Image (cartoon, rainbow, N blue to C red):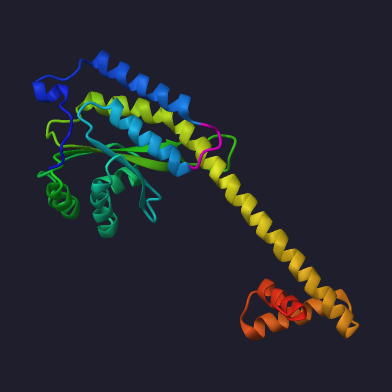
């Protein structure tokens, strides 16, 4: 079992609720202070994982799962535990997927869930994990977008080598934590989607320019109009089963000797 620093629970006691709330608040403040408005989503999620580990008593490691339809682990404070996530993805079941699909916190004690999640149980036992808490990070629907339902952004998967870890107070604390953190994650998600949209527009503009140039060449060579030149490109695209842009680029390359 991996080594971990001693915690209050090892000494037979846990921090009191006020102290635990203060720790979570301080961790969340540090997260918000260190985030920028233009930071890749995975980088934000890595910060979130590290912050959650500092905020929760008995949290020995945290991973972050995204995209429940095609799940992957986007961040981790201990990469050796990513295997536990991946066993759940491969089996299409487990506490992290249940949290993502139901948008509810799921707590699991290893050794008590064999019938429900045998793959998770086997992998968690292999790594010495005894308690597990998966907390969804949700992007609430609002009047500013077209979504009718809350959107799952990520799930915080919190691992502990202590079987008694994660009491109801921890669950309530993480609800508050993820509600506050969702704003930072949502900003990163919007920024990433904007970047992707700009990239698609740039690709479309380049494609349009290439096709227009190829049309001009055909119009000059065949003394035809723009519509007829475009039809020539379309017929060749269909005949060769190639994208229209690739056919146009090949024509231009043939003229330049590339």
Main structural element of the magenta stretch: helix, strand or loop?
A: loop
Q: Quadrant of the C terminus?
A: bottom right
Q: Residue at x 76, y 64 (%)?
A: 209
Q: Relative to residue 8, is residue 210 depicted above or below?
A: below
* Near-viewer residue (164 or 202): 202
* Near-viewer residue (147 or 73): 73
Q: Quadrant of residue 30?
A: top left
Point out residue 106 in the picture as x, y percentages from the top left corner. Answer: 25, 39
Q: Let me know if residue 38 is in the magenta part.
A: yes
Q: Residue at x 70, y 83 (%)?
A: 236
Q: Relative to residue 219, is residue 126 depicted above or below?
A: above
Residue that sits furthest to the right in the current view:
223
Q: Let me know if residue 226 is in the magenta part.
A: no
47 relative position to 221: left or right:
left
Q: Which residues are magenta?
A: 36-40
Point out residue 14 in the picture as x, y percentages from the top left corner. Answer: 16, 20
Point out residue 173 in the picture as x, y percentages from the top left corner. Answer: 30, 24
10 relative position to 223: left or right:
left
Point out residue 187 in the picture as x, y percentages from the top left corner. Answer: 52, 35
Q: Quadrant of the N terminus?
A: top left
Q: Quadrant of residue 55?
A: top left
Residue 28 visible in the picture: yes
* Near-viewer residue (69 or 34): 34
101 relative position to 207: left or right:
left
Q: Quadrant of residue 245?
A: bottom right
Residue 141 visible in the picture: no
Q: Residue at x 46, y 28 (%)?
A: 34
Q: Relative to residue 187, is residue 230 depicted above or below?
A: below
């Amino acid at each position: 079992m991996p080594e971990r620093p001693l915690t209050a629970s090892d000494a037979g006691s846990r921090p009191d609720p006020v102290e635990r709330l203060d720790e979570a608040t301080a961790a969340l403040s540090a997260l918000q202070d260190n985030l920028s408005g233009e930071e890749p989503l995975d980088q934000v999620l890595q910060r979130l994982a590290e912050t959650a580990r500092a905020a929760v008593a008995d949290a020995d490691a945290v991973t972050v799962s995204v995209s429940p339809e095609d799940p992957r682990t986007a961040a981790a404070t201990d990469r050796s535990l990513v295997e536990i996530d991946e066993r759940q993805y491969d089996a299409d079941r487990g506490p992290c997927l249940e949290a993502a699909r139901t948008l509810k916190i799921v707590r699991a004690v290893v050794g008590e869930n064999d019938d429900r999640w045998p793959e998770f149980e086997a992998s968690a036992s292999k790594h010495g994990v005894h308690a597990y808490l998966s907390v969804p990070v949700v992007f609430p629907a609002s009047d500013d977008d077209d979504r009718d339902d809350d959107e799952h952004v990520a799930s915080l998967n919190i691992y502990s080598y202590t079987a008694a870890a994660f009491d109801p107070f921890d669950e309530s604390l993480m609800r508050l934590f993820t509600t506050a953190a969702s704003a930072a994650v949502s900003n990163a998600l919007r920024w990433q989607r904007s970047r992707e949209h700009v990239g698609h527009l740039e690709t479309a503009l380049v494609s349009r320019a290439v096709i227009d140039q190829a049309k001009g060449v055909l119009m000059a060579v065949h003394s035809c109009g723009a519509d007829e030149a475009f039809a020539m490109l379309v017929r060749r695209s269909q005949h060769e089963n190639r994208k229209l842009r690739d056919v146009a680029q090949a024509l231009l390359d043939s003229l330049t000797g590339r």
